[in-house]
Image: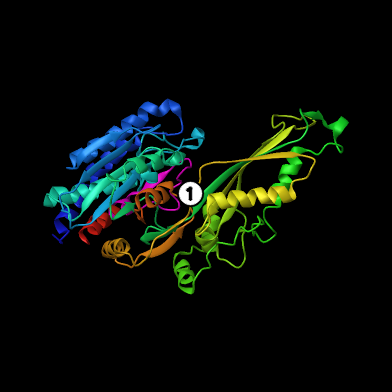
Amino acid sequence: MTDPNNALEYVRANQSRFLDELKELVAIPSVSTLSEHKADMKRAAEWVAAQLRGIGMKNVKIMPTGLHPVVYGEWLGAGKSAPTVMIYGHYDVQPVDPLDLWKTNPFEAQERGDYLFGRGASDMKGQVVASIKAVEAIMKSDGKLPVNVKWLVEGEEEIGSTNLEEFIKKNKKMLAADFCLNPDAGMTAADKPTITTGLRGLAHFELRVTGPARDLHSGGFGGTIHNPAQALAELLAGMHDKNGKITLPGFYEKVRKLSKKEREDFKRVAPSNKALLELTGAPALWGEPQFTPVERTGARPTLEINGMVSGFIGQGSKTIIPAWALAKISCRLVPDQSPEEVEKQLRAYLKQNAPKTIRWELTSGKGSGAALVSADSVGVRALAKAFEATWGKRPLFKREGGSIGAVIMLQKQAGVDSLLTGFGLPEDNIHSPNERLHLPTWRKGIEALTRFFYNF
């Protein structure tokens, strides 16, 4: 069973229905971080489970976790000698705020030209449906798959996969697989099929600075009491030098140097500086000058200030020295950094640089390490061949700047490496108003995944 033509014809003949079913899933407001959507989360899980049953998967079940359920299913009819591919996805989405910037209702999936607009259309309900439909096409055409498959579709990715690691740990035997196909990455452009061979890890922190016991009159105490907002700003500013290099002690000790081949691969996927500025709306680029922008986002660690708050921020003025100031900080990590080591480095920086005139408290959230996949692995080669047959060109290989907790969790708890791909585009507005999915690319993606399974 190596000829995908019947299955590909099935994909092309059912494009309209596939899109209608994607619209159904996008219409479910499965926002995992908001408690008022708990029932919607259950509805989305039930929708995915019903789809898996409908395409012939076995042992489909909705399994509880500490918050939102995991959908599991399997088809093991290819036999013990065939490889087992786990297919990962998530059915939860980001909040839609600010709602007034949406041109259409975020949970009424609407086509406009070549795009489908709606929250989750690209991240990642479109990718989940593409995976389901590729498997459906093979099952309906051949009655069986060339490989064994297992499905792991969670509902907490957008809130850090809070309960997934414990779920994987408890269900190692059930989740045993040769590798995981994870379509939660994306492409660099509609005409550039892309395979992601690396993800950065993540560490995040909350830094709280306190000074006086209460807000003080700035006229009576200004110049005498150190302002916590000023002290925090100075500490944050000192975490980078003028060239964008992070100043935490030992921060770069375990960062791997890029090889000549890796730098050549980065050049192949690099957008122009002009394109980056147009995409972001920023007036100029910034960062370590010895690295290109694509190397900075794919293979270099970062430290970002995600938010700051202190004192009076209402209309008009209030002349105070605030009692406290707070900042949210996150670090994107590369091999071989770890969140635990970076926390120690951040604490060392604060001990060295925080003045005696304030007190500081650092708390950390759950983090994850970075991941790398060999470009010569069987899964990568099978997917590269599928992309070349679908797009007519060799795919690009890139490292993604973001983080996907499930990748590290599966590797750590179940020994399963992930193959990262996807058909979202940089301009899809994921996590932002007016999220959209480029439908011609999505349709090609279904064909590519269909070919991928045959390539084993």
The answer to whether 163 is drawn above or below residue 419 in the figure is above
Q: Position of residue 147 (x, y in %)?
A: 20, 55
* Residue count near mark 1 (Cα–Cα under 10 Å), binned few <14, some 14–19, many ≥20: many
Q: Is residue 56 magenta?
A: no
Point out the stretch of residues depicted in magenta: 423-444
* Badge 1 element: loop
Q: Position of residue 110 (x, y in %)?
A: 35, 39
Q: Position of residue 308 (x, y in %)?
A: 65, 40
Q: Is residue 118 visible?
A: no
Name the kind of residue labelled 1 in the image: Ser
Q: Is residue 359 visible?
A: yes
114 or 202, which is in the foreground? 202
Residue ID for mark 1: 368
In which quadrant will I find the N terminus? Answer: bottom left
425 or 144, which is in the foreground? 144
Q: Is residue 437 magenta?
A: yes
